[in-house]
Image (cartoon, rainbow, N blue to C red):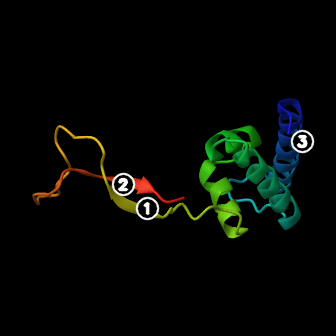
Amino acid sequence: MSYDHVEEQGQQLRGKLDRERRKAGGSDRWRCSEELRLRVVTYAVACSADGESHGFIAARLGLTQSTLSRWIREAGESDPGFRSVAIVPSEQKAARPFTAGKVLRGGPVVLASTS
């Protein structure tokens, strides 16, 4: 998506969110319609894929980061946040290898992503 299109779509969604909030009497505890929530999640996932943080996207939409992240998670669109890792021997000699209270034989180790 082009930056102008992202901004324009974000402003439109923010306007719709603001109208729903006003309909609820401006309360902090308002309910967003499922349709609008889905549009927000779809927009946020697309922006996130372009490298934007949930905090930045939420601020653009006038939401809190926790609300946006919860909506994404509830929609099943979130990355679980865990990645597979493996411990592999290091090619470099570390000044102070991490030992976690135990002496390591054969040199320092590093964590490397397997994905």
The answer to whether 36 is drawn above or below residue 46 in the figure is below
Q: Label 3 belongs to which residue?
A: 12
Q: Label 1 belongs to which residue?
A: 85
x and y percentages locating residue 106 in the rendered image: 17, 55
x and y percentages locating residue 90 in the rendered image: 30, 49
* Mark 1 or 2, nearer chain start: 1
Query: Which labelled disc corresponds to residue 31?
Result: none
* Mark 3 or 1, nearer chain start: 3
The residue carrying pointer 3 sits among few (fewer than 14), some (14 to 19) or many (20 or more) residues within 10 Å by Cα, namely: few
The answer to whether 82 is drawn above or below residue 90 in the figure is below
Distance from label 3 to label 1 (Cα)? 41 Å
Do the numbered discs 1 and 2 sit on residues whose CB atoms are within 8 Å? yes
Residue furthest toward the top? 4
Query: Which labelled disc corresponds to residue 111?
Result: 2
Residue positioned 69% across, 61% down in the render: 72
x and y percentages locating residue 67 in the rendered image: 65, 56
